[in-house]
Amino acid sequence: MSVNLNKGQEISLSKSDGGELTAVRMGLGWQAAQRKGFLAKLAGPREIDLDASALLFAGGQLADVVFFQHLVSDDGSVRHLGDNLTGGAGAGADDEVVLVDLGRVPAHIDQIVFTVNSFTGQTFAEVQNAFCRLVDETNGQELARYTLSGGGTSTAQIMAKLYRAGRGWELKAIGEPASGRTFQDLLPVISGHL
């Protein structure tokens, strides 16, 4: 059963049988909002390139990053499945995917922060049906979904983070609007969530 997350909400990633998740998928989906006006409607929606990134932190320090130019973490535990330059048809499918093999994440990595940036510079007012979701990769079950709030002047968002809690992992929906075309632009905002 999937949980619709609110900003700041946290969930444990322990399975109902007491086991721990071994692999998760963070999916990002979106579509361009329809333009306003007669001529704009004839031209159709503008292409919007949102980029998902996963930033791996150890003790508050950035240790590695996975994004469209570095698709696999140095240790191989986190993989980005490729850059989508236009988004989807709004059918709820994932347009970009980051896979995390939780069992392979090195012990010193204590947080993985997921971000989304508008690489083409459009604001979230020009995006609709945007979401991120966490899926148990072993069985395809959606565990949690966070709807990325549309509107506003932000061009990026700190979506969520996985973090170690005891022997397992937990997920926190962050939903912090930010400005920037790349993950580097977001580091000052991310630091407040570590």
Image (tube, rainbow, N blue to C red):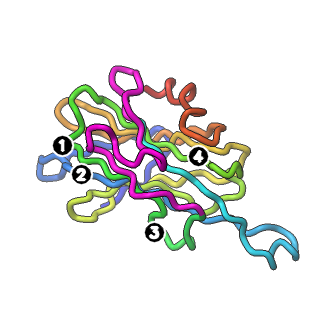
Q: Can you give x and y, in whole percent of width and height, for residue 152 in the image?
A: 72, 47
Q: Which residue is mark 2?
A: 23
Q: Residues within 10 Å of mark 3 (few under 14, many from 20)?
A: some
Question: Disc 3 versus disc 2: distance between alpha carbons?
Answer: 19 Å
- CA distance for labels 3 and 4: 18 Å
Residue type for callout 1: Gly
Residue placed most toward the observer, 163 or 105: 105
Q: Position of residue 40 (x, y in %)?
A: 83, 71
Q: Amino acid at mark 3?
A: Ala
Tag 4 residue: 117
Q: Which residues are magenta?
A: 56-85
Task: Identify which amino acid the numbered label 2 is placed on.
Answer: Ala
- In 3D space, how far apart are the residues under numbered discs 1 and 3 (Cα atoms)? 26 Å
- Whether residue 74 is visible to the viewer of this picture, yes or no, is yes
Magenta part, dominant SS: loop
Q: Position of residue 184 (x, y in %)?
A: 55, 33
Q: Is residue 79 left or right of residue 166?
A: right
Residue type at tag 4:
Asn
Give the secondary structure at mark 4. Answer: strand
User: Mark 4, residues whose alpha carbon is within 10 Å: few (<14), some, or many (≥20)?
Assistant: many
Mark 2, other Cα within 10 Å: few <14 / some 14–19 / many ≥20: some
Residue on which disc 1 sits:
103
Q: Which mark is residue 180?
A: none
Q: Earlier in the sequence, mark 4 or mark 2?
A: 2
On the image, which quarter does residue 1 sit in? bottom left
From the image, tell me which residue sits under label 3. 93
Spatial CA span between label 4 and label 2:
24 Å
Magenta span contains residue 31: no
Find out whether the residues at labels 3 and 4 contact each other: C-beta distance under 8 Å: no
Does the magenta-highlighted stretch encompass residue 71? yes
Mark 1 or mark 2: name the one nearer the start of the chain.
2
